[in-house]
Amino acid sequence: MYQRSHSRSRSRSPSPARRAIVAGLAIIATAAALPAFAAFPDKPIRIVVPFSPGGGTDMVARVVAEGMSKDLGKPIIVENKPGAGTIIGSDYVAKSAPDGYTLVMATFAHAVNPSMQPKMPFQTDKAFAPVILVGRSPNVLVVRADRPYKSVADILAAARATPGKLTFGSQGNGTSAHLAGELFKITGKVNLVHVPYRGAGPAITDMLGGQIDMMFGTVAAVAPFIASGQMRAIAVTTAERAPALAKVPTIAESGLPGYAAESWYGLYAPAGTPPAVIARLNAAAKRAVQSELFRKKVEGEGLTVSAGAPAELDTYVRAETARWEQVVRSANIKAE
């Protein structure tokens, strides 16, 4: 009886060789179970800019990409995909693999398009995963330097004297510049004609060429032309003056109390991107945005750096979406 029991007990105890095999299999299984993104990134990353080259978003994206590339040790390619008020570029990213290798530098239009576009190819609040709110900045109401307008009062007077004659350009339908102009029309009770472009670059070219009377542009896009004397800055759109243009008044203090609008830049990945990848991208973007290089090239042109956690971008954009939805509805603004 004892012998039988002892024999059975020995047969149940794995031999050293068997234990080694089991241990080896366990290690292999554990390694196989490690997420594929553990080595992220192992190839180049793309940041899609949904505007033409030459504007503020393009410039910000390229400076961020330069810093992130150094941190991540892989090339980051900036790819311009303009059109449809940023929807073409955003849709491309929304439908890309959620692996962290395709991102979009979103702007104000990201929060406004859902209320302007009756048929979006994606559901904005579900199609993207927030990475980081890069920063916020004012738009600037500018005219060509040889134009007679020197203040908001001058523009309002001219607009009231010739309703529907003055034109303003922007970098596209639904952008912060467009809605800043629409809010100007509502608050000032004037009729200006909006002329949308595929990016700030073409709008600037036409304004300097005399095809449009004025434009609302990001500080990043128009600051070089203000500095060179080609443009005159009339006012900034934010509630407070911009440090980079301290002598330029706000629209609110120039005769339209309560007026306030701002642009912003935020990096998104496709929804479903693994949290570990988002965290890696956020950390790299944060270091890039907080670098001396970034501050030297961008912050001095009006951008107030944010660079917080992904949740900061999500919370901010949800609030902006709700706020501007009311403006779009009350003004009956439609996508063209």
Image (cartoon, rainbow, N blue to C red):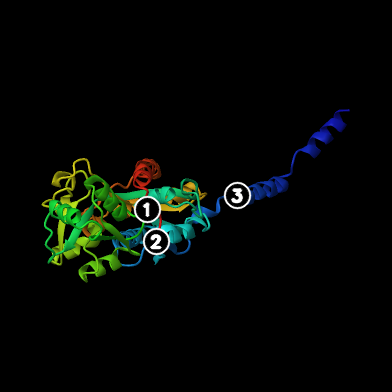
Check if mark 3's residue and mark 2's residue have beta carbons within 8 Å.
Answer: no
* Foreground residue among 78 and 91: 91
Could you tell me the amino acid type at mark 2?
A: Pro
Q: Tell me: 314 left or right of 146.
A: right
Q: Position of residue 112 (x, y in %)?
A: 38, 49
Which comes before the other along the chain, label 3 or label 2? Answer: 3
* Foreground residue among 134 and 170: 170
The N terminus - image quarter: top right
The C terminus - image quarter: bottom left
Residue 109's disc is 1
Indicate the quadrant where residue 72 lies.
Answer: bottom left
- Front position among marks 2 and 1: 1
User: Pointer 1: residues within 10 angstroms few (<14), some, or many (20+)?
Assistant: many
What residue is drawn where x is 42% and y is 47%? 115
Could you tell me the amino acid type at mark 1?
A: Ala
What residue is drawn where x is 39% and y is 48%? 111
Indicate the quadrant where residue 13 lies.
Answer: top right
- Front position among marks 1 and 3: 1
Q: Position of residue 249 (x, y in %)?
A: 13, 49
* Foreground residue among 28 and 209: 209
> Number of callouts in the render?
3
- Front position among marks 3 and 2: 2
Q: Tell me: 36 left or right of 321.
A: right
Q: Residue furthest right?
A: 1
Residue bearing mark 2: 50
Q: Tell me: 148 left or right of 65.
A: left
Residue bearing mark 3: 33
As helix, strand or loop, the secondary structure at mark 1 comes to: helix
Residue 242's disc is none
Q: Position of residue 66 (x, y in %)?
A: 33, 62
